[in-house]
Amino acid sequence: MDGKSLRHRALAALVWTAAWCVVATAAKAQPAEEYEARREAVRKLLSPRGVAVFKAQERSAESYGCPFRQESNFYYLTGINQPGAVLVLSRRGLPIVGQERPAKEVIFLERPTGGEELTPEQPTSELLIDVARPLHEFYGVFAEALTRADTLYFRAPRLRLEEPLTKELELIEAARLRHYPVVVSNPTGLLAGLRVIKSQAEVELIRKAAQLTCAAQVEAAKSVEPGMWEYEVAALVEYLFRRGDGDGSAFAPIIGSGPNSCRIHYSENKRQMEAGDLLVVDIGASYRHYCADVTRTMPVSGTFSERQRAVYEIVLKAQTEAIAIVKPGVRMSDVHEKAAQVIGQGLVQLGLISRPGEYGKYFVHGTSHQLGLDVHDVGEAAVLQPGMVITVEPGIYIPEENLGVRIEDDVLVTVQGHEVLSAAAPKTVAEVEALMCEVGIGNMK
């Protein structure tokens, strides 16, 4: 193994180890008043005697050593990024020991084991939540809620037949045996309509995530060269996200070269890149829990072949024209149809299909999805509205030629039209080739 390869491997090991070191923190990235308003909006959606329970993501024994990522609905309502917490919202209010009046919202917290986690003793003014109580009191309140609620909004875990019931499910079963007429409903539907429209604070967090992602795309393009391994690019990306004060990757980086450029959700990242390959770099930073998702395609040798360039230009044209129509009132399906129309015509010109309607042979996925707290965010976005953030990501995949191209940007729907949040990542042929002539921090040219 030559010195360059050894240095590459050393870099990969170093940044990969550093990237997965994390301490959960309770610092909120948005004003406490914004979380308060969201909780109030959810409470107003509850049934007359409804009670909603939102649990934080649990820290399992298997998950230690990996970054903690909060359950998205819980984070949306609290901004708290720590395990061992439960939020209860009530339309009418619930009796809480030591409280003079029924509480309409209660946060239950366990004592922290370190870091900057919140404690039950901290004043509720810091959270703007009615009542904060120790976690061990939750089940008593939960049992009481079952006797008073007409609907319990609770996301019950999916269990295998041989698994024992959770404490919550045991209490629900006991309430039903005692003939309390409570209906259990998944609370995600309550939040979906709220989460689909991003506040200005949320947009700024997504913008920051996109900026980190674009910076990583630039360094990847500068660093890629024949002989590198896909995992080295993935490690470099993680390092850059962390160095930029991000949470890390919003999803497993997709670094697909050669035949892997045609694999849509490839994440093994274990192939050594060769001269003449195309490399699809589909990455997204998470910043204060909000996600970006940006894809660029680059030639490993530094310049596109004639065939690669022809395919790339079709995808770029499809993406450019699809982004151009993004504005309020446009259907998300219209965005896809625009991209598909351009790709269909291009594939006919390349001789790969006989008529545009056959584009699905080489364009095998949708053009857009929503973006926010989750990479594929919740909520109905059939018709675009101001405040929505979507991806626009057409692609062409020709497995018989080991040639895949995807270009993806994050687009905010504005009152006037749209804003491309990931515009800082160059994508024209000339721009990509120029970047690849520069020296990146991930290689040793």
Image (tube, grey):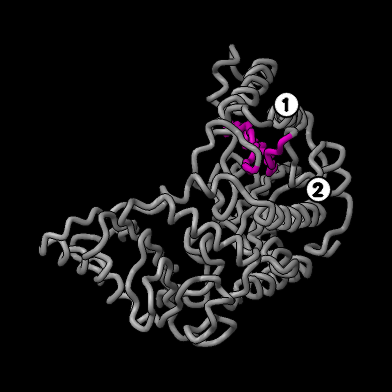
- The magenta segment is 387-415
Viewer-proximal residue, 430 or 142? 142
Q: Quadrant of residue 304?
A: top right
Write down the residue under mark 2: 424
Q: Is residue 169 above or below residue 65?
A: above
* Residue 294 x, y percent position in the rendering: 68, 47
Mark 2 neighbour class, 10 Å CA radius: few under 14, some 14 to 19, many 20 or more:
some
**Mark 1 falls on what kind of element?**
helix
Describe residue 98's horizontal placement relative to residue 390 as left or right: left
Q: Is residue 382 above or below residue 28?
A: above
Write down the residue under mark 1: 321
The answer to whether residue 341 is seen in the rendering is yes
- Residue type (three-letter) at the residue carrying disc 2: Ala
**Label 1 to label 2, Cα distance in Å?**
18 Å
* Residue 117 x, y percent position in the rendering: 55, 81
* Residue 300 x, y percent position in the rendering: 75, 47
